[in-house]
Image (cartoon, rainbow, N blue to C red):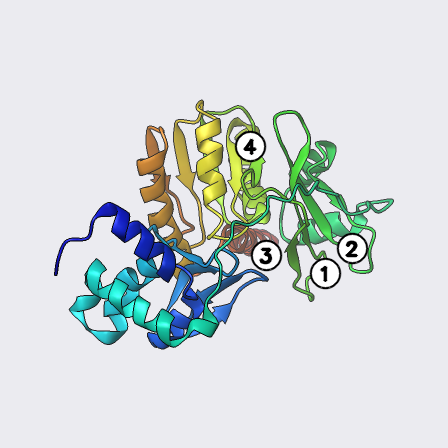
Amino acid sequence: MTMLSKSELKIRRKNVSKYPIKVLAEELGFTVLKVGRNYLTLKEHDSVRININKNTFKQYSTGAYGDALAFLLQFGFETTNDKRFKSIGYSLNYLEKRVDTNHNLLVEPKEEKQIKSNLVLPEADNNNDAVIHYLLDRCISEDIIDDFIDKGMLYQEKCWNKNCVFVSYDINKNPVYALRRSSNPHYRFVQDVAGSSYKEGFFIDNQSDIVIVTEAVIEAMSLMTLKLHEAEDFNKSSFFCLNSVYKWEALINTLNKNRNINYVVLALNKDEAGRSAVKIIQENIQNRCNVRRVIEYLPDIEGFDWNDYLRERNRLTLEAKSLDEEYSMSI
């Protein structure tokens, strides 16, 4: 096949970029699932995000991204076992035929409008009793809970289920990211507050050269509690909470903005998703950030997050103490 010139490739690529990646994925045999108002994923590759508005995709596990042609080059061979899909020329021809056959399906890829959405924090309750009780039940230190409340990083929402509201601030002390979490242990509810900046994320900036990365704010509070148990100052490290293993782009942005950070400790959950995220984040930090070292630090127990670990440790400590008291009484 004749080599395509850059100008010809650009023109032909623009034409086939109108073919819906959703339809293309289904034609290739993938199971497409909705994961948000404007995003889709694949059951077979849960790190893939397809942007419906832009008609583009990104595979976070590999870093692959792009238009319909890029998607076909990335995934065409997997389900068809046809090596020709690894060729730009063949894949272009394939898509052009699909465009001609299914002209009514074509979409006009468009850039999403950047809507400035100021973060409006939920209304605060007149006390924090339910939030404090919930976090104490999770074995979080009362000193750490008080520290979060005093710094405006935590309060109780005025609503029927008394949500915990966690708030992160930028360098000018403006709130940039917030999330709700139910304080009722029998009702699971976690939600980002509308207007939260996914470029900023949840960053607890203690002006340290070390940042500890966790999957959730409660995991960060659990690690702080464990530090207190070891008589360490929990404010000596900064913390970054992903609030989803797929939101690591905000971490990369934070590292690039805070050049004082030299060490990144990836303290994610000890499960398949946590281990997978560690590999992806390590690769992206090494390729895109200027840090000295990335350290993996997972709980000792398989399947545990740091709050599970903290509660299990407290349980074992209480059991040991009870046995000691029984022994003392028996002699």
Q: Is residue 113 left or right of residue 117?
A: left
Q: CA distance from mark 4 to mark 2?
A: 27 Å
- The residue that label 3 is drawn on is 326
Q: Mark 4 highlights which residue?
A: 234
Q: For mark 1, does the 10 Å Cα neighbourhood hold few (<14), some (14 to 19), or many (20 or more) residues?
A: some
The N terminus sits in image quarter: bottom left
Label 1 element class:
loop
Asked if marks 4 and 2 touch (Cβ < 8 Å), the reply is no
Q: Is residue 280 above or below residue 102?
A: above
Instruction: Report if residue 234 is visible in the image.
Output: yes
Q: Earlier in the sequence, mark 3 or mark 4?
A: 4
Judge whether residue 271 can be spotted in this image: no
Dot 4 alpha-carbon crowd within 10 angstroms: few under 14, some 14 to 19, many 20 or more = some
Decide which of tag 4 and tag 1 comes sooner along the chain: 1
Mark 3 is surrounded, within 10 Å at the Cα level, by few (under 14), some (14 to 19) or many (20 or more) other residues, namely: few
Q: Are marks 3 and 4 in contact (CB under 8 Å)?
A: no
Q: Secondary structure at mark 4?
A: helix
> Where in the figure is residue 102, as x and y percent of width and height?
41, 75
On screen, residue 121 versus residue 254, left or right, reads right
Residues under labels 2 and 1: Cα distance?
8 Å
Q: Residues within 10 Å of mark 2 (few under 14, many from 20)?
A: many
Q: Residue at x 78, y 55 (%)?
A: 162
Q: Residue at x 48, y 56 (%)?
A: 109
Q: Count the numbered circles shown.
A: 4
> Label 2 belongs to which residue?
162
Q: Position of residue 32 (x, y in %)?
A: 45, 72
For the residues labelled 1 and 3, the Cα–Cα distance comes to 34 Å
Of discs 4 and 1, which sits in the foreground?
1
In front: mark 3 or mark 2? 2
